[in-house]
Amino acid sequence: MTHRADGREPADYDSNGYDYRSYWRGRDYESHAEQHALGRLLPRFGHVEWFADLGGGFGRNLAHYADIAEHAVLVDYSANNLRAAEARHYAAVDRGRLHLVRADLRALPFIDDAFDAAMVVRVLHHLTELDRYLAEMSRTIRARWLLDIPIKHHLLARLRALRYGSAVPLSDPTPQITGTTAGAFRLYHLGAVRGSLDALGWDTTEVASVNNLRRWDRRLPPRLTEALQTPAAGIEALAQRVGRGWWGPSQFVLARRRHPARPRLRPVPEQTQPHTRGLAARMACPSCRGGLDWTDFAAFCRRCGVCYRHHDGFWDFAAGVPAPVPAEAIA
């Protein structure tokens, strides 16, 4: 999760020692459905020099872009998630293949067109003012990105409306808010989100319907669930293709920019470490978009004087948490 549902502040995934990895225990079907879709779709990107996993959590999907991307940047607001990602993917971080960045999706610390390609999975349902978020994320992507869009007009929702009646206008472009105030989620009309992307200069294609047999394995006895795993996986694989746009609650959309441009990379000071140089050339202060000077421990904005630290394996560019320049960073 990246932001609170009320839109005022980022969601707190770091309170009370919460570990997002625990969410996936007992959710084998959901995990398999997503992994199957990503394993089929991300290779379509071909070779990518710089890839962004926006709202990427603890890096559970890294395996799907590690083979296609020369360099990847995993962005998340949760420090706990990023610590878990550093522990899980230490070798990739140590080699400079994977960079971990703590940031707010409303104010990303990257230049325009920083990434050749990107993905956003299990993120949009947490976001308010979706157009604002889409504009900021798309600003940093040069050519293509894969979006997981949670929709309100999926098959199960329509069947429920037919059976029980519903006050929720499933065809209305207005997002539907579900859950409690503390844990509200937003569901969207697919056409409305695609329209927003179109206005930002992206052509979109529905490429997969995901989680089509929603929570089936959590409603049956374990022995029966185990026996039905193989046929359920087969149905999911078929439904991902034939159910695009209407069946599953998660619709994956591939967006291609109509007029891609090359990024105007920032000059990097000579003393910047080799593993950081490529990343540094693509970054800017999230507060003022100024250029940055780098050390092993911090990035210092030349324009507004804000310092962003490196600790626990990740660069902390979260909005609203600038730190004074540490003495060791300017010595």
Image (cartoon, grey):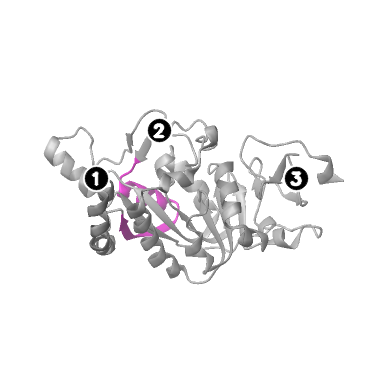
Q: Name the residue under label 2.
A: 183
Q: Is residue 56 left or right of residue 208?
A: right
Furthest residue in direction front, as rendered: 223
- Amino acid type at circle 2 is Gly
Q: Is residue 27 left or right of residue 56?
A: left
Quickly name the residue at label 1.
Answer: 219
Do callouts 2 and 3 mark residues in contact (Cβ within 8 Å)? no
Label 2 or label 3, whichever comes before in sequence order:
2
Q: Position of residue 289 (x, y in %)?
A: 66, 46
Front tag of 1 and 3: 1
Q: How far across and down, in percent of the image, does residue 250 sit? A: 33, 51
Question: Are the two marked residues, 1 and 3, in contact with CB atoms closer than 8 angstroms?
Answer: no
Label 2: how many Cα within 10 Å (few below 14, some 14–19, many 20+): few
Camera sees residue 214: no
Report which residue position mark 3 lands on.
300
- Disc with the residue nearer the chain's start (2 vs 1): 2
Tell me which residue sits at (51%, 51%) in the image.
54
What is the number of the mark on residue 84? none
Question: Identity of the amino acid at label 1?
Answer: Arg
Mark 2 vs mark 3, foreground winner is 2
Which one is nearer the viewer's eye here, 153 or 259?
153
Q: Give the range drawn in magenta.
A: 187-210
- Label 3 is placed on what type of residue? Phe
Give the residue furthest to the bottom.
46
